[in-house]
Image: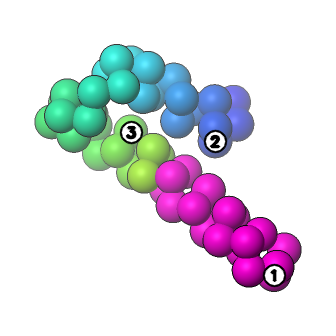
Amino acid sequence: MTDKELAQAIVDKYDRNYVHFSEQATRKEFHTVLKYVADEANRMQRKTAGLD
């Protein structure tokens, strides 16, 4: 499973509700989703700046 698919599966598990996700997700699930979001933000920022 790719990072995107894994993060999507975790988010779907909590019905895209951040409150439930932040309260009920395991430490590993929380880390996985936030790492994916940060990596995507960094990728988009590099693309915008022309560094990619």
In the figure, 40 relative to 25: above or below?
below
Q: What's the distance in space between the residues labelled 3 and 1, CA to CA?
A: 30 Å
Q: Is residue 4 above or below residue 41?
A: above
Tell which circle, 2 or 3, labels the residue nearer the N-terminal end.
Answer: 2
Nearer to us in this view, 10 or 40: 40
Q: Amino acid at mark 3?
A: Glu
Q: What number is the disc on residue 3?
A: 2
In the rendered structure, does residue 48 fall within the stretch colored magenta? yes
Picture coordinates of residue 44, whole percent (x, y): 68, 63
- Find numbered disc 1 in the image and state the secondary structure of the residue it sits on: loop
Q: Earlier in the sequence, mark 3 or mark 1?
A: 3
Type of amino acid at the residue the image marks with label 2: Asp
The disc label shown at residue 51, or none: 1
Label 1 vs label 2: CA separation? 22 Å
Nearer to me, 7 or 41 = 41
Which residue in the protein does label 3 denote? Answer: 29
Within the magenta stretch, is there residue 32? no
Left or right: 38, with 5 as reference point: left
Q: Secondary structure at mark 2?
A: helix
Q: Residue at x 82, y 79 (%)?
A: 50
Residue 30, percent from left and from top: 34, 44
